[in-house]
Amino acid sequence: MQFDLLRWLFQDPATAGADAGLSGSEPFHFLWPWVIFCGLGLLVWFYYTVEGRKRFVKGKPIAKRMLDRFLGWLAVLCLVGFVFIFARVAMDSSLFAWRFWRYLWGLGLLTWAVVWVVYLIKRYPKERANMEAWNRRQQYIPAGKRKKAKAGSR
């Protein structure tokens, strides 16, 4: 018997369970790891937006911009992951219960991780060095005199 990848990817769990001779739908083996990962991802994003921006990256604009961008995408990926978990568990015979969506989500997560690692290795050190050089130059530029506004006599 030959393995049919398209049928395997685009088959709903109820039909897959019936084809395998199971009484119900095909079991979802990765439910709890997915729930834990998506829950932790949303928890990290929530903590960062509420408290972490003030505590950890207050005076570091480059790190703040990087974490805003990447943790925002992590939150989006985790929310989409919860949608796919719900579709797989509660809507067995629906379109979003297909394996294709879970593997596409995993590919998106892998792409997000690779982009973050490439940014940390290639671009972040250059941006940090440019910011430090700019801060050093700003030390030697005199600040302009500020004129005090006179009280309005109108």
Image (cartoon, grey):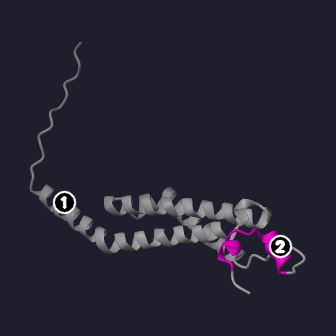
Q: Residue at x 24, y 68 (%)?
A: 126
Q: Give above or below for 132 relative to 143.
A: below
Q: Residue furthest right?
A: 23
Q: Which quadrant is the C terminus positioned in?
A: top left
Q: Residue furthest top?
A: 154
Predominant SS along the magenta part: helix
Q: Give above or below for 111 relative to 79.
A: below
Q: Residue furthest bottom?
A: 1
Q: For residue 54, which quarter of the picture?
A: bottom left
Q: Is residue 40 visible?
A: no
Residue 9 on the magenta span? yes
Q: Is residue 134 left or right of residue 102?
A: left
Q: Where is mark 2, residue-wise?
A: 25
Q: Are marks 1 and 2 in contact (CB under 8 Å)?
A: no
**Front residue of this view, candidates 117 and 3:** 3
Kind of residue at badge 2: Ser
Q: Where is mark 1, residue-wise?
A: 135
Q: Which quadrant is the N terminus positioned in?
A: bottom right
Q: Residue at x 70, y 72 (%)?
A: 7
Which of the marked residues, 1 or 2, is nearer the chain's N terminus? 2
- How dense is the environment of label 1, judged by Cα within 10 Å: few (below 14), some, or many (20 and up)? few
Q: Is residue 147 left or right of residue 122?
A: left
SS under mark 2: loop
**Front residue of this view, candidates 26 and 140:** 26
Tell me how far mark 1 sits from mark 2, CA to CA: 61 Å
- The part of the chain drawn in magenta is 4-20
Q: Residue at x 27, y 71 (%)?
A: 125
**Front residue of this view, candidates 114 and 34:** 114
